[in-house]
Amino acid sequence: MAMQPGTPPTVSPFLRTAAAYAWRLLAVGLLVYSLFAVLGRFHEIGVAVFLGLVITALLRPVADLVARLLPRPPAVALTLIGSIVLFLGVLALVGEAVAGERTTLVREFRAGVGRIEDWLERPPFRLDPGTLSSLQDKIGDYLSSHRTDLLSTAVSGAGHVVAVFATLALGLFSSVFFIHSGDRHWSWFQQQLPRSVRGRVGIGGRAAWRTFTGYTHGIVLVAGTNAVLVGLALWALGVPLAVPLALLEFFAAFVPLVGSPIALAIAAVVALASKGPLVAGLVIALIVVIGQIEGHLLHPLVMSWAVRLHPLVVAISVVAGSIAAGVVGAVVAVPLVSVVWAVHTALRDARV
């Protein structure tokens, strides 16, 4: 049947749904990129405040329990000092494990490099032995000829180390006040606002903090579970540096979707160099198993505590955050989007 003149063309429901999701995803990506572009101008302060909020989300419940037995200031001090001692103890354990295995590691890696070269020389790769030797010689010549440049780069990196420690110190300093009297600070902030918006700001603030603490607790649970599984598996397979690699997996899990596979890929390279292709293949199988556990069990549990985000939104957020602010942006992106969406949902429901 021919369409009458002046009749608007019909659009299929599928295209309407696709268009609706498309502009929402583009809006989320643009919002994340814009926020990180602004924060990039003051990224040290932003990272420090974010770190202080993470510490507060983790330690505020502990401080509240200790405060039942002690006055509030000593309870906060005891909680923070105990956490710092625990963290430094873990780092000391990792350092001791690396130092204790240093001689064995050097011997195993030298033998492992030889096995990898033999493996590449056989089918299906059939690389020329002279090619591998030439590559090693070129790497050695490059390091020798650029020794001054590498040294100057390392020296200039000392300034970045100072900035990192200053950011950590500011984050820890902020967490002291957030844990001790964060609720009073929030009440004071609300009192400075016009009366007409205090209610909506209060609703949004409660939703934001509930989402942020839920996400923080959940992602720490995911990271800890992954680290324990990886550490036990690597120890059972006899892969060296099991404890440091497990700690690397713990921190990498804070970058959704991509962090854990990268950490486990590093573990596979270590297994290949030290134990051979068979053990490296088992580690790769471990990557698949842990990815399934994380994707189908742990992350749904985390999102049920915070805000349920579509995996595509998570992926776009991580990419946009990494483009705008590097590794820090990739870590901060998902909780930031979760908080923004939680505030939007809470304010929308409040209008109903």
Image: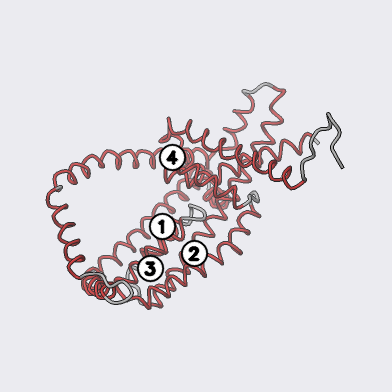
Say whether residue 186 is left or right of residue 49: right
Identify which amino acid the numbered label 3 is placed on.
Answer: Ala
Say whether residue 167 is left or right of residue 319: left
Whichever of callouts 1 and 3 sits on the residue coming sooner in the sequence is 1
C-alpha distance separating marks 1 and 3: 29 Å
- Residue at image coords 54%, 45%: 317
**Which of the two residues, 59 or 311, is positioned nearer the viewer here?**
311
Q: Nearer the viewer, mark 1 or mark 2?
A: 2
- Residue at image coords 59%, 34%: 184
| Mark 3 crowdedness (10 Å alpha carbons): few <14, some 14-19, many ≥20 | many
Identify which amino acid the numbered label 1 is placed on.
Answer: Leu
| Mark 2 crowdedness (10 Å alpha carbons): few <14, some 14-19, many ≥20 | many
Identify which amino acid the numbered label 4 is placed on.
Answer: Ala
Whichever of callouts 1 and 2 sits on the residue coming sooner in the sequence is 1
Snapshot colouring: secondary structure
C-alpha distance separating marks 2 and 3: 15 Å
| Mark 1 crowdedness (10 Å alpha carbons): few <14, some 14-19, many ≥20 | few
Whichever of callouts 4 and 1 sits on the residue coming sooner in the sequence is 1
- Residue at image coords 81%, 33%: 8
Whichever of callouts 2 and 4 sits on the residue coming sooner in the sequence is 2
Q: Position of residue 151 (x, y in %)?
A: 17, 45
Residue behind mark 3: 268
Residue 226 is tagged as 2
Residue behind mark 1: 86
**Which of the two residues, 337 or 304, is positioned nearer the viewer here?**
337
Q: Nearer the viewer, mark 2 or mark 4?
A: 4
**Which of the two residues, 190 or 1, is positioned nearer the viewer here?**
1
Residue behind mark 4: 325
C-alpha distance separating marks 2 and 4: 26 Å
